[in-house]
Image: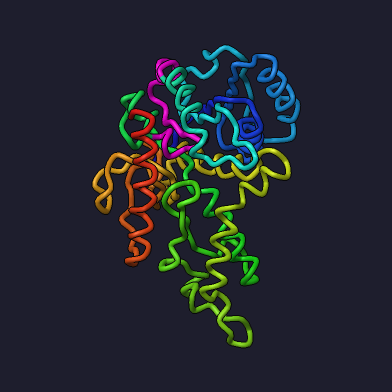
């Protein structure tokens, strides 16, 4: 594996998500340098100063940034968090038009300053915006992708672990499809340790994950963001941590398998839309999209997710 030296992570947007990602990246030593940009200069500079004051208590990483986009020059990875935020009761798709226009404005400027970077979108609706960003930039599909359902899968693993009474690290399960209302778990491939999820029993031998339990857990994952937003106005800590994890896989060329969202070509009959499926993420971005086994019901759900996103993309004129 080739590890990138003197790594630089650029974060576009110093709102709750962008600043949380910067914070998580500094604590985890995700990159040697973190650059935080926002059109609101005072906001960006204040966040940078606050974070810089904490660097004596972290590793060797440093933080820079402000309202001049040149701060991102030479970045190895650019994470885009800028955009209108999701309001209580608002679906991710409702955000599409507004955030697409923002992306049309900033994407060419970003590529000009960091032409060799891998671009990761966190702004919602991330699947739709991934298609738009890839078209605007002209970069290969693997170099422009979104965080997709990495966080959703983390939520699922946490819920399953809590129910089973095991460590989340021992739960192997993924949410795939749209990062939104049509996403779904790959129950057919889920397991705890080496035990298929549907065969997991408690100490008395009783099946833990019945169909009703699985349906309820799926609903909990899909509505998780709405519950957090209703209570505090935004989701930021978990997406910051999951974003840092994706960045690390790129900068360290880990080739980790993560359910990120990239523009698909000939994937189970799906073309031209970005959906989350398990993918190998390394120094070149999405290096391979894995053709994971799915049962007939899951294949149907994936196609339904693709159709919903395709309709939105066409509505926006892409």
In this rendering, the answer to whether 247 lies above or below 213 is above
Report the residue at 50% width, 72% height from top: 197
- Figure quadrant of residue 2: top left
Q: In this rendering, does residue 307 appear at all?
A: yes
Side (left or right) of 239 relative to 282: right
Q: Position of residue 234 (x, y in %)?
A: 66, 38
Which quadrant would the C terminus be assigned to in this image? top left
Report the residue at 41% width, 48% height from top: 276
Count of picture labels: 0
Q: Position of residue 163 (x, y in %)?
A: 63, 69
| Foreground pick, 268 / 114 | 268
145 falls in the magenta region: no
| Segment colored magenta | 108-130
| Foreground pick, 6 / 188 | 188
| Foreground pick, 139 / 281 | 139
Report the residue at 40% width, 17% height from top: 108
Q: Position of residue 76 (x, y in %)?
A: 45, 28
Which quadrant would the N terminus be assigned to in this image? top left
122 falls in the magenta region: yes
Report the residue at 65% width, 66% height from top: 162
Q: Position of residue 47 (x, y in %)?
A: 70, 24
> Colour mode?
rainbow
In this rendering, the answer to whether 85 lies above or below 223 is above
Q: In this rendering, does residue 143 appear at all?
A: no
């Amino acid at each position: 594996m080739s590890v990138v030296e003197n790594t630089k992570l650029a974060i576009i947007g110093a709102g709750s998500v962008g600043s949380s990602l910067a914070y998580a990246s500094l604590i985890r030593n995700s990159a040697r340098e973190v650059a935080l940009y926002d059109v609101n200069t005072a906001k960006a500079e204040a966040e940078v100063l606050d974070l810089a004051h904490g660097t004596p208590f972290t590793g060797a990483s440093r933080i820079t940034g402000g309202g001049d986009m040149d701060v991102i020059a030479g970045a190895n990875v650019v994470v885009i968090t800028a955009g209108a935020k999701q309001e209580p009761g608002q679906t991710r798709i409702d955000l599409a038009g507004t955030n697409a226009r923002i992306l049309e404005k900033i994407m060419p400027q970003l590529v000009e300053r960091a032409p060799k970077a891998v671009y990761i979108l966190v702004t919602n609706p991330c699947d739709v915006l991934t298609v738009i960003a890839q078209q605007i930039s002209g970069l290969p599909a693997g170099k422009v992708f979104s965080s997709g359902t990495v966080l959703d899968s983390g939520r699922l693993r946490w819920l399953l672990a809590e129910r089973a009474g095991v460590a989340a690290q021992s739960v192997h399960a993924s949410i795939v499809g749209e990062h939104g209302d049509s996403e779904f778990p790959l129950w057919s491939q889920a397991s705890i340790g080496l035990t298929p999820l549907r065969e997991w029993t408690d100490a008395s031998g009783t099946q833990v994950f019945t169909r009703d339990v699985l349906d309820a857990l799926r609903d909990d994952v899909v509505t998780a963001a709405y519950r957090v937003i209703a209570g505090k106005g935004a989701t930021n800590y978990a997406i910051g941590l999951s974003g840092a994890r994706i960045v690390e896989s790129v900068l360290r060329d880990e080739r980790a398998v993560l359910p990120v969202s990239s523009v698909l070509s000939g994937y189970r009959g799906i073309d031209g839309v970005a959906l989350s499926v398990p993918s190998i993420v390394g120094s070149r971005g999405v290096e391979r999209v894995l053709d994971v086994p799915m049962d007939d019901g899951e294949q149907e759900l994936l196609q339904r997710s693709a159709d919903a996103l395709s309709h939105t993309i066409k509505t926006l004129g892409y």
